[in-house]
Amino acid sequence: MDYMLLRHRDIPKLNQIDVFMKEDGFEGLKKALKMDTADVTNEVKAAGLRGRGGAGFPAGVKWSFMDNNNWPHYVVANADESEPGTFKDREIMESNPFQFLEGIAIASYAVGANAAYIYLRGEFWEVAHFLDEKIEEMEKAGFLGENIQGTDCSLKIYTHLGAGAYICGEETALLESMEGKRGQPRVRPPFPPSQGLYNKPTVVNNVETLTSVPYIINNGAYGYRKFGTEKSPGTKIFSLSGNVNKPGNYELPLGTTFRELIFTHGGGIPDGKSIKAIMPAGASSSMVVANDEALDTPLTYEDVPNVGGDLGSASVIVVDDSVSLDWLIRKTMDFFHHESCGKCTPCREGSYWMKKLTERIHSGEGTEEDVALLKDVATQMQGTTLCALGEFSTMAVVSSIERFPEDFA
Amino acid sequence: MSLAEKYPQEIEKILAKYPPEHKRSAVMALLYMAQREEGYVSKADKADIAQILDMTTTEISAIVGFYSLYHDEKAGQYRIQVCTDIGCALKGADQYLADLCEKLDVKPGETTEDGLITIEEVKCLAACDKAPMFQVQSPKGIKYHEKMTVDTTMELIEELRKDVQETK
Amino acid sequence: MTKEVTLTIDGKEVSVPAGSLVVDAAKKAGIDIPVFCYHPKMEPVGMCRQCLVEIGRPAFDRATGEAVLEEDGSPKINWGWKLETSCTNPVSEGMVVKTTSEKAVKGQNDMLEFQLSSHPLDCPVCDKGGECLLQDLTLAHGSAESRFNFNEKRHSEKHFPLGDLIWLDRERCIQCGRCVRFQDEVVGEAVLGFEERGSKTQIMTTSDPGFDSVFAGNTTDICPVGALTTAQFRFGARPWEMEATASVCGECPVGCNTVLNTRRDAKSGGKIIVKRVMPRQNEAVNETWICDKGRFADFSAEGRLLAPKPEEWTEAVAKAAEKLSAAKGDAVFLVDGSLSNEELFNMKSLADEVGGKALCYSEVGGGALTTKSGSYSKSGAGDAILVIGGDLYAEAPIFWLRAKQAADRGAKLIVATEAETRLDAFATTVVRDVRKGLEIAEEVFANAENTVVLYSGDDALAQFCAALNPTSLIGVWAEANTQGAWEMGYEAISDLSALKGKTVYVAGKDALVASAVEAADFVVAQTVSMTEASEKAGVTLASQIAAEAEGTFTSAERRVQRFFSAVQPIGDALPGYVITAQVAEKMGVTLDIDAEDVFSAFSDLNYADLAKVSAEESLLIGGTCYENKQGLGVTLPAKA
Ligand SMILES: Cc1cc2nc3c(=O)[nH]c(=O)nc-3n(C[C@H](O)[C@H](O)[C@H](O)COP(=O)(O)O)c2cc1C
Ligand code: SF4
Ligand code: FES
């Protein structure tokens, strides 16, 4: 298959504007600018492109929710990429930046935004500066700025650096952070398309989602749907990490099985060990038992739940049989406790409590009651937290205790 | 000198990114600017930024406290921030960190005797396929170093040492 | 009229205005859903998650838009799998809410357990004990044993000063953010914030001076636990040991409704004393807030005058009457606005009867012009406010707050003062020149609905302001009841040298008494304090303070409000109107000596009119009480 997103793997120096333009760069934008804005949205809707940030919400549908009685509109690219195990957006931005920026421009055109922001996690300091240069080049080439390509469409893209907070990947926390506040989530509704940045209608999309857009406009919904499944069309970048021989990003059609990803592409498990568990969506995943059924499950939004997981941002962490899961969930709780924003009670207190319990259990001083209590505390958080982070923090804990009881005996 | 006196043009450029009635959005960028010299946000910096953005110093402090890349206190000139999160840990990052610390004779969170290097343990940096890895946060910015060993790290530290001596 | 929406809460049908929150709708139906972060005066944030309930919404057919019905014909209700926060969900037609179902109660108890996992069990020594939301809930639902079985609870500072007036106990803080949001949203002085994040989140301030806000004390009321306390009240008394008496603040002309909490106090020789001042809700005046001037007002006995001079009341009264009678029509009856209406009226009556002059001292001029003002508490979009000549923040803080809030709601706010003020930041227009301010106001007022002028200045300024013909012309008097004096027909005096050679019966603040003694020939001083001047006066009459006597004040917005006697009088002091009546009697003039009678004698109103309350004043949701059972007062009709 040709790459749709990681095209730089075939085309060297694609992050240089002249190379990009030679390789059909900005054709999607040029085409979009000639279309009715609603048609652009409809094309993306028809393509069935689902958000790559984790929730899998259809991008076109989100764009169509923008409140047209309230202006200005904004587009915000979510480049916070902080889910442990996820490292795809960085590769896109470093190596195929123009396609990403082109995606932003098309989205902005579709929803009538004249300003777009890229919210990057603070650690992507160098990426941000690199993108600033690329944005300038694009402006010079007439694909950004005033009257793009002679149309009356204008767009400025700005980078905005976060400063080390996983929660800022959550879209409303991201917007708070962009507004110069502590990055804590807002109550939803209202959702960003009705009240987002500065309380104005805002589309928030993941980097990969936006980078998929030029292809869709260029090749049409039908062309896009040649890949993937009915409910999960297109290709997806799978960030593969953990106990595999060849960790890295793999762009594959949705519907590829875990087995193919891990063994064919990822080269299998090192040191003659065998696979024990899979976290399909980074630290926020449930711990999926890596049996044959799971390995033969297609990586799609609709299939992964069948084996007790979620596709999420498709950051597949492989766990081999030398790893005891009491250690692993101690790690996840370390993470979630560190990243809980502290706004809501169950997550603030529950993550601390769970961290203490996982530490005690891992140290060997935990009792059977501690394990039961840990599961209880986690279950007690589910469905009560203000945003999904709190919920995420319970996934690996509950599923590990349920599915791998021997690791907690 | 206040930040406003020191970097007038740059501040203007940052503010230009946001609608004038929402200049508060510039706080993140201004905090990075403040950290450029000493590696942390001083009380005077907070007051400067508060003034520029019509905020209170309490609001500035609340933001500094929330984000892990802003610091209230001085540490080593270079903060070596090693990821020991799940992906890296499965690839031996914990051991790598322990070995590095031993070599430098510090514990995580501590600074080397010469005040040059502070070793810190951080959460996932989106480089899980290239473990062990770390980023170096310094007044100059943030730089990733991937697929590291203790030896290559020590070489890097030597370079940093030399750099500092030369600029002195 | 806003649309009414009907929903069912715990089986009860309730109708509330569209846009109401479920938690408030429940309140209206008499159902208290437990809350911590929610406060009816602030935007809901849904942080604490304590108010979780089950919410079901009627199902609609997507194609037809019709309601889907069950087999029995009742509407089909969709229930989500999650509990929802009742403080963030607006009501909708046909909604069904369960606040006490097994699932809802489990959710609420689970949240409580999380709260308690890091909360110290120091209720027995906590100032909030008895009016603490957390304690109430724990007693009602909490489990006796903590499942958080770690030796170390998180320990943090227990005595952390946020400034001179307010202390923070970090262990007790439940991070509900009410205090932070109050300072930020309501007051617009973001001097409190959270530091760190996650389980390390703590309240802090870096303002200099610490917790720099005249509204700071309110955060101790709205804190649902004992984390914020006032330096004054800390360890002072247990809430349930105190009596509560309705009062009206006497520190400025806003007339905030207050409650005086009193208790017998060992340190004060077993006397009943005022332990703290709390706000009493009155939406037209102070909502649920008071400023720190009022909250920390001095009620101590120090320096109080215990007895008259000459030392027997009969003698003192006789001597006063004799001297005043001798002066005949030349006698001057001088007051300031610190007196109650009842005191003012008897004084004025006496002056009128003997043909003397009734004068009220006020530096702010224009008393004859402020004849038609009313409350501007509801001002907003379409209205305009001019604040001219003075610093409301210092002079009348709740007026300041209301001006700021009106601007938040879209009112045009013009600030015209020579010096910078804290109101500048919220103003539509700021000018450092009073004359210019008047010009701008004239333009702006031409296109505004309700127009309000708050002025502090001399008679000339008042004239200019009156010429703008605003809906409300409000003099920002130095005293609480100066407006009351104007309403009664006192004449204004600002230059006291005119008293030279006169016999003066003066009642008011120490400074006024001192000036009178300085200037006049003979002075009868009716006063509450023992000062050098009162010593020098010919006759000194020991008067009670408002907390001891009863009476009424008329606010600068012309609202007449009643206060009650909260503590026993000190020494032999008598209510001012009684003293005046006794002096009058000796002069052959009969005046009422019962406060209620005095009030009825001068006013078309009576105390019963002032005692009315309305349904709007029922915001109380557990914990600290703002409840107003004793009356909202009455705004006087505009005079021609
Ligand atoms: C705790 C949390 C962290 C998240 N982190 C990210 C992130 O790093 N990047 C991202 O694109 N979306 C993240 N999301 C999802 C966003 O909230 C949002 O759904 C997404 O940016 C929408 O874009 P999409 O529809 O294109 O996926 C996160 C969500 C939560 C609850
Ligand atoms: S769930 Fe956690 S991260 Fe989300 S609002 Fe609550 S405390 Fe913050
Ligand atoms: S979440 Fe509703 S009261 Fe706190």
Image (spheres, coloured by chain):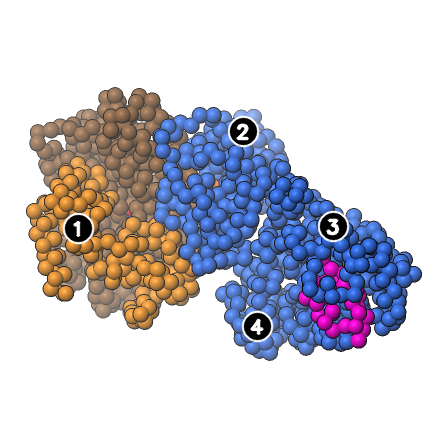
Could you say where residue A116 lies in the image, as x and y percent from the top left? 32, 59
Question: Is C353 situated left or right of A92 in this image?
Answer: right
Mark earlier in primary sequence (4, 2):
2
Residue C519 colored magenta?
A: yes
Whether residue C565 is visible here, answered yes or no, is yes
Residue at 71 percent of width and 65 percent of height: C533
Pointer 3: residues within 10 angstroms few (<14), some, or many (20+)? some
Q: Secondary structure at mark 1?
A: loop
Q: Describe the element under mark 2 as helix, strand or loop.
A: helix
| Outermost residue to the right | C588
- Write the residue at 51% across / 57% down: C213
Dot 2: chain letter: C
Chain ID, blue in image: C
Question: Please, what is the three-letter code of the amino acid marked with disc 3?
Answer: Gly
| Amino acid type indicated by mark 2 | Ala
**Res C571 label:** 3
Number of dots carrying numbers: 4
Q: Are the residues flagged by discs 3 and 4 in contact, CB closer than 8 Å?
A: no
> Chain A in the picture: what colour?
brown
Q: Residues within 10 Å of mark 2 (few under 14, many from 20)?
A: few
Give the magenta-colored segment's residue range.
C501-528
Q: Which label is found at residue C140? A: 2
Q: Which chain is orange?
A: B
Question: Residue C221's spot in the image, x, y percent?
Answer: 56, 46
Label 4 residue SS: strand
The reply to whether label 4 and label 2 mark residues of one chain is yes
Snapshot quadrant of residue B28:
bottom left
Output the chain of dot 3. C
Q: What's the mark number on residue C416?
A: 4
Query: In the image, which is nearer the foreground, mark 3 or mark 1?
Result: 3
Left/right of residue A24 with respect to residue C344 in the rendered view: left
**Disc 4 + disc 1, Cβ < 8 Å:** no
